[in-house]
Amino acid sequence: MQRFRLLTMMAFILMFAVVSAPAWAFDAKKLVGTWSYEKTETNLTGKKPFAMKVFSEWLMTFNADGTYREKSKLGDKQKPEVSGTYQVQGDLIVRSENAVKMRILALTDRELVITSAANTKIFFKKK
């Protein structure tokens, strides 16, 4: 009887772990396309999150062949365009020319939400 209880409890724990595990069950094909920066939300102060526009422009294009291109502008300062290869590893986007990994928080046909720093969400819309 004790063994049955233990097995039942272990099965319940495993079932709960699978159900509550972080779900990065998104369709990685939806990443393909050009994404335009919308806003950044942060909660660095520990209080209520607030939104801000960090980049005046940030475009990321992910191609089906595993290549990407990025261009951004901070204020009126154009940053150099970057291109290389990318891989989706679980919920991470790993780019060959940028050591900062981007964790995908949400991915739909129209919206991409990523994070690369604690308490920060970066929002993109598909062009």
Image: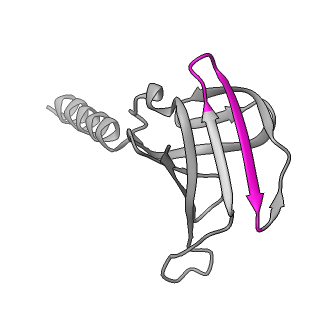
Q: Is residue 36 above or below residue 51?
A: above
Residue 103 shown left or right of residue 95 in the figure:
left
Q: Main secondary structure of the magenta part?
A: strand
For the point 33% across and 44% down, the residue is 20
Q: Is residue 21 above or below residue 7?
A: below
- Quadrant (top left, top right, bottom left, bottom right) of the N terminus: top left
- Quarter of the figure with residue 21: top left
Q: Where's residue 92, x and y in %?
A: 59, 37
- In the rendered image, the residue lying farthest to the left is 1
Q: Where's residue 83, x and y in %?
A: 77, 32
Residue 74 in magenta? Answer: yes
Residue 71 shown left or right of residue 119 in the figure:
right
Total count of labels: 0
Q: Nearer the viewer, residue 83 or 16?
A: 83
| Colouring of the image | one colour
For the point 56% across and 19% down, the residue is 64
Q: Nearer the viewer, residue 88 or 58?
A: 58
Q: Where's residue 37, x and y in %?
A: 58, 55
Q: Where's residue 98, x and y in %?
A: 79, 39
Q: Nearer the viewer, residue 85 or 26?
A: 85
For the point 72% across and 40% down, the residue is 70
Residue 120 in magenta? Answer: no
Provide the residue span drawn in magenta: 62-75
